[in-house]
Amino acid sequence: MAPLKLEVFEANVGASPANTTAVDAAEIEEQRLEAFESGYKAGWDDAVAARSDAEAEQRNEVARALQALSFTFHDARAHVLHALSPLMAEVAARLLPVIAHAALPHLVVEALGPYAEVASEAPVLILLNPEARHRVETLIGTQSGLPVRFQETADLTPGQVNLRLGETETRVDLDAALATIRAALEDFFDLAAKENRHG
């Protein structure tokens, strides 16, 4: 019987098996290094891209948080100002006049200071509303060295006093000062409300 002959599938049939093994091992090592470098580069690129994406997401989160905080601050400010508006109006309407009328005699005495330097025998004429006379007269009575004369007039409000010496006249007008303060408060709260509506 004839021996069985099998077909050989190797590329170099005539080459020695040791040589084939060495070439194959070197080729395999080269392919392995190329695959490692390719994988390392792909991994590095993925890490850089992931870090860049994470940083962009963090920046976006910070921007969203700041925007929300800004809206929250403006809303809180608007609510506080809205709540304070009636209180400040009440203070301007009730408390400021009381403080102003209590300060009126002191302001008159302060306004009399320049007259004391020029007044000789002629008294300083103090024109005032009958309601304010007692308060002003009581305080000025404690001041010495300046001749004064009082004249009541209904033309002035309790918050107004005129001082005259010859041609010189000075007006102490707390009503005008209070009106200016009230207008400033109203303007402030109106402006705050407009800013809140228009962002």
Image: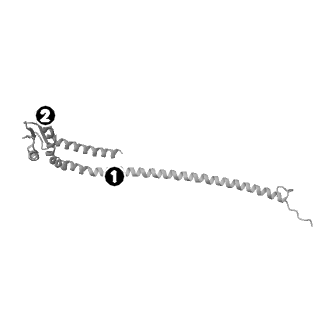
Q: Which residue is mark 2?
A: 168
Are discs 1 and 2 less than 8 Å apart at CB?
Answer: no
From the viewer's perspective, tell me whether residue 194 is left or right of residue 93: right
Q: Amino acid at mark 2?
A: Thr
The image shows residue 2 at horizontal and vertical percentages of: 92, 65
Asked if residue 157 is positioned above or below residue 12 in the image, the reply reads above
Give the quadrant of the N terminus: bottom right
Disc ID at residue 186? none
Query: How far separated are the C-alphas under marks 1 and 2?
Result: 52 Å
Which image quadrant is residue 13 in? Answer: bottom right
Which of the two discs, 1 and 2, labels the residue nearer the N terminus? 1
The image shows residue 199 at horizontal and vertical percentages of: 36, 45
| Label 1 SS | helix
From the viewer's perspective, tell me whether residue 158 is left or right of residue 33: left
| Label 2 SS | strand
Answer few, some or many: residues within 10 Å of disc 1's Cα (few below 14, many 20 plus, some between 14 and 19).
Answer: few
Q: Amino acid at mark 1?
A: Ala
Q: Which residue is mark 1?
A: 76
Tell how many labels: 2
Which image quadrant is residue 188 in? Answer: top left
- Which residue is rendered at x = 31% and y = 51% of the image? 79
From the viewer's perspective, tell me whether residue 54 is left or right of residue 4: left
Asked if residue 113 is positioned above or below residue 5 in the image, the reply reads above
- Which residue is rendered at x = 76% and y = 55% of the image? 27
Q: Residue furthest right?
A: 1
Nearer-the-camera pick, 2 or 42? 42
From the viewer's perspective, tell me whether residue 183 is left or right of residue 154: right
Nearer to us of marks 1 and 2 is: 2
Tell me the colour scheme of the image.
one colour
Nearer-the-camera pick, 139 or 30? 139
Nearer-the-camera pick, 30 or 127? 127
Which image quadrant is residue 145 in? Answer: top left
